[in-house]
Image (cartoon, helix red, strand yellow):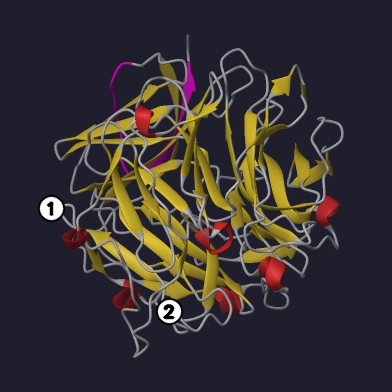
Amino acid sequence: MFKIVFGALLAAGSAAAGPVFTDRAADLPGPAHVYDGGWEHFVGGGVAVFDCNDDGLPEFLPAGGSNPSPLYLNTTAATGAALRFDRAEAQPLAGVTGVTGAYPLDMDGDGVLDLFVLRVGPNIALRGLGACRFEDATAAWGLPQADRWSTAFTATFEPGQSRPTLAIGNYVDRSDPDGPFEVCDANILLRPEGTDYGPEIALVPGHCALSALFSDWARRGRADLRLSNDRHYYVRAGAEQMWQLSPLRLLGPEDGWERVSIWGMGIASRDLNADGRPDVMLTSMGDQLLQFSDGETGFRNAPWGQGSQATRPHLGDDGRPSTGWHAQFGDVDNDGLADLFIAKGNVQQMPGNAMRDPNNLLLQQADGTFVEASVKAGVATMERSRGAALSDLNGDGLLDLIVVNRRAPLEVWENTSAGAGNWLAVTPFQDGANRFALGAWVETRTAQGTQQQEITVGGGHAGGQAGPLHFGLGSATGAEVRVIWPDGTATDWQSVTINQAITLTRQD
């Protein structure tokens, strides 16, 4: 069973005319924020999105590289009002540079979101104190403080643990004089020991990971670790990787895991074909690779006609291959079909790839294919984008957009689409260490069908978000919802009122 806590109800439109976004970057306070820096910040540039003061509206913290990372406090006047933010500091990060990205999660089980901050240099764990205040808990929690170049992060709860298991992806080994090519650093796994963490476990070989995601890929009740790796630096010997946690081992062909070598930048996951398993989008230089789950740990590549490859710029006259970074699925028009945003941009001045490389907004069609909509939506910008986030920033049921650019100002776009479909935003919550139900699946059911989403921490490119799972419901006038909790216990289906945010609290 679960207890439902309702939020504010909003009316939905009637006839969708396609998504439209309004530029709100000029309304951000202070100087324009830029992700900057030398070659160690060619990659990274993520953004963490999370509600740190429990007012129902998310804040965000973008990576800064050679610049400090500000905290943007959401001061939007009311539900559905134009986006507004104040600029502050997460105090332990005041003046701190080298940040490549950050991920929100509850690391100590107190029901308050913390931040794991990735850096070129020692990573930092910030303990949330409420009211958007933080303290540095890196040493107190027994976390390593090595001087590395961290670019990927993900977390999961293993059975019986009071802290999440963490995986940290590291890029080139900066200390190796034979680098940078073929000197990828080892990735590390951190398993809890009581309320602290044990010694780091090296995940070798490392192939220059730029994204990591724990997910129950085969719906067996356990999470496996997927790493997306950049062949630009591993050159020959590397490939994409999947690690099994218990017992810890690297999966191979005998497990159904096929070798794939790409310029891996980001991971996005979503069950696109309603088979109950997460499918995966991998960004790269050239083709973006969409793979459908094929049972167990196997995946099959989407056909070319899927419309998801986004291999070259769709705007302008630069015909060289694209470079994809952050990818995220989200239903931007609330028609009940997950759409896909891909942040694009040249690494720096790579002559073999497009320099003017617009971001993609791919709308999913009823037959499962995708069509480009970024130009009409207004978000086909040409800066060298890196991290991004689709998130409902003003609580109106429409997913807004944040984009972090390299050596260009941060972008914030408010979704002002007219006539979008109905929606539901769902936050599961439970007692115990895993308060935010990491690893749970939330399902919604309407006459249009059933949608399923998994609660994960990780993926994307150097940034992620914590908050409600957003479901577009199309023209449905009612919905049912249930939660499959991390231990596999499923609630009964229960009818809910649509066009609102609800919290589902577990009642055992």
Mark 2 to mark 1 CA distance (whole Å) = 27 Å
Mark 2 or 1 closer to N-term? 2
Q: Is residue 115 above or below residue 382?
A: above
- x 54%, y 44%: residue: 212
- x 50%, y 67%: residue: 82
Q: Is residue 97 magenta?
A: no
Q: Which residues are magenta?
A: 492-506
* View extreme (top): residue: 508
Mark 1 residue crowding within 10 angstroms, few (<14) / some (14–19) / many (20+): few
The reply, left or right, for residue 173 in relation to residue 286 is right
Which of discs 2 and 1 lies nearer the camera? The answer is 2
Q: Is residue 493 magenta?
A: yes
The reply, left or right, for residue 161 in relation to residue 275 is right
In this orientation, does residue 450 appear?
Answer: yes
Report which residue position mark 1 lands on.
Answer: 367
The dominant secondary structure in magenta is strand
Report which residue position mark 2 lands on.
Answer: 357
Element at badge 1? loop
Q: Position of residue 317 (x, y in %)?
A: 34, 91
Type of amino acid at the residue the image marks with label 2: Asp
- x 31%, y 46%: residue: 423
